[in-house]
Amino acid sequence: MEAPTQIMPAHTEVERTALAWMNDPYRHFGWSNTKIHSLPRGEVESVQLAAMNLRLRQRRAQIKVLEKLADGQGITHLAALDDMAPLLFPHDMYKSYPVSLLAKNRFDQVGKWLGRLTPYDISAVDVSACESIDSWLSVLQTETPLDVATSTGSSGTCSFFPKSKRDYYLSMEGMRVQLAQRFGTPPAEADINGKIHALTPMYRDGHSSTGRFAHYILDIFCKGDESYLNVAFPFKISSDMMWLAARLRAAAAAGDISKVEIPPALLARRAEWEQAQKDLPAQASAFILRVAKELRGQRVFAMGTSHMFYQVAKQGLADGVRGEFAPGSVVMGGGGAKGMALPEDTEEVIGEFFGAERMTQAYGMTEMNSFSVLCEHDHYHVLPWVTVFLLDLETGKPLPRKGVQTGRAAFFDMTQDGTWGGIITGDLITVDWDTPCPCGRTSVGLNKAIQRVSALQGGDDKISCAATPQAQAEAMDFLTGFGG
């Protein structure tokens, strides 16, 4: 399948730089984490604006929903970064298909909806034999450049995000560049090309990030050596079962599980899935303890939740067991504390067990190619090819790019290949635009305290967009209208 039309030619030096960032950013910076995070803000924003206009000219002809949204507001050119706000897609746009289509296995229609969100033409892909979400996504994965990512469906509806294989590779490449190097020091050959053992309590395959990451970790960290890849569950996690669980949770919350429309064959596997979920924490913990001992003295990239790593480290130290990885190893934790506040000694206990200098964290999401890594001064530093917006919760308008601002997080990722690149999230973030971070990085830093807007609003999160209501309605009508 042909790739979307490339943007050529660039007419100015800033456009040529924008193209380099868009097409192969890590090569452009010599795979140097220090160079990436040491650019003057004015230079970064000039390149970002040029990239936005290049992408807009390219994608409006390829993604019809974007064309509808831009035409409905008369937007043909962006004069300033904040002019992008009316063209950002709400994150729930990627689950706006009629849920009944999944229950009826109408993957031709779900594919028609998805095709309106990606520059890749997937209309000719034959999905007539697909009888499950997994089989449909596997066909797209095999026959197109896409590697569609699903969500866990915590709201009761799974999203389908048209991530491409290139998008996934960029995500993992960025993870390695930022984690394998110490900021302020040029990268060593081993940092860029050496094999690094990977330890992650996730699945070997799947269509959610927790399943699909392993495929790309194998290439980027392990350099294709299967013996360097250590995953807790050496099988594929089922997107169908994740969807089943999401539908049942939503129905139970609504108080009537009898009205859930799910294929009988899938519903019959409910007990199997529920038992597997009960067994998962203990199995993952046992896996981490075992592999941490086996990899003692090796350079390791360990990725999991802070909560799980803490429980394992606490138990291991109590039993006299330590991982003690080699220098240059990385232990990256994240969310998943299940609503519980982590103990104050979490990072110290995890660091002592694994022998790592410190546990780091990263902020990211399926809808972006970039992970923002936490510095030692508790700021998530955003890669320069990602533009940060803080939106007013009531109006959806951008807040000023000065002083300390708190608002809904939105981003434009100029490297996005599988879709548009502009996303409005459900997160509330804080940025100090004027005070340089003591760590020395000049890139935008998000305050570590990130909250879900829905948690602050009693479980609901009605996104207010900067787009005009009519343009937004017309774009959504086009996206979800299956007659045209």
Image (cartoon, rainbow, N blue to C red):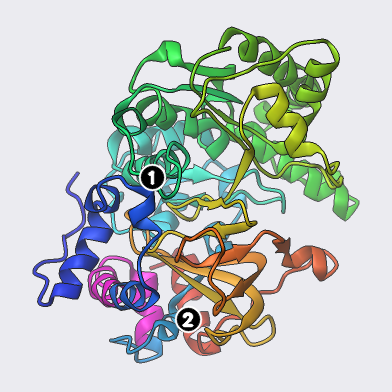
Q: Is residue 449 above or below residue 132?
A: below
Outermost residue to the right: 255
Residue depicted at x 43% and y 78%: 87
In-front residue for pair 441/410: 441
- Magenta stretch in the rendered image: 50-71
In-front residue for pair 56/244: 56
Dot 2 and dot 1 residues touching (CB under 8 Å): no
Q: Amino acid at mark 2?
A: Ala
Neighbor class of circle 1 (other Cα within 10 Å; few <14, some 14-19, many 20+) is: few
The answer to whether any part of residue 131 appears in the image is: no
For the stretch drawn in magenta, what is the main secondary structure? Answer: helix
The answer to whether any part of residue 273 appears in the image is: yes
Q: Amino acid at mark 1?
A: Thr
Q: Position of residue 466 (x, y in %)?
A: 54, 85
In-front residue for pair 248/145: 145
Q: What residue is disc 2 on?
A: 85
Label at residue 185: 1
Q: Position of residue 309 (x, y in %)?
A: 72, 29
Q: Is residue 230 above or below residue 1?
A: above
Q: Is residue 63 above or below residue 280?
A: below
Residue depicted at x 50% and y 36%: 207
Q: Earlier in the sequence, mark 2 or mark 1?
A: 2
Q: In the rendered view, does 104 fall on the left or right side of 119?
A: right
Neighbor class of circle 2 (other Cα within 10 Å; few <14, some 14-19, many 20+) is: many
Residue depicted at x 65% and y 56%: 378
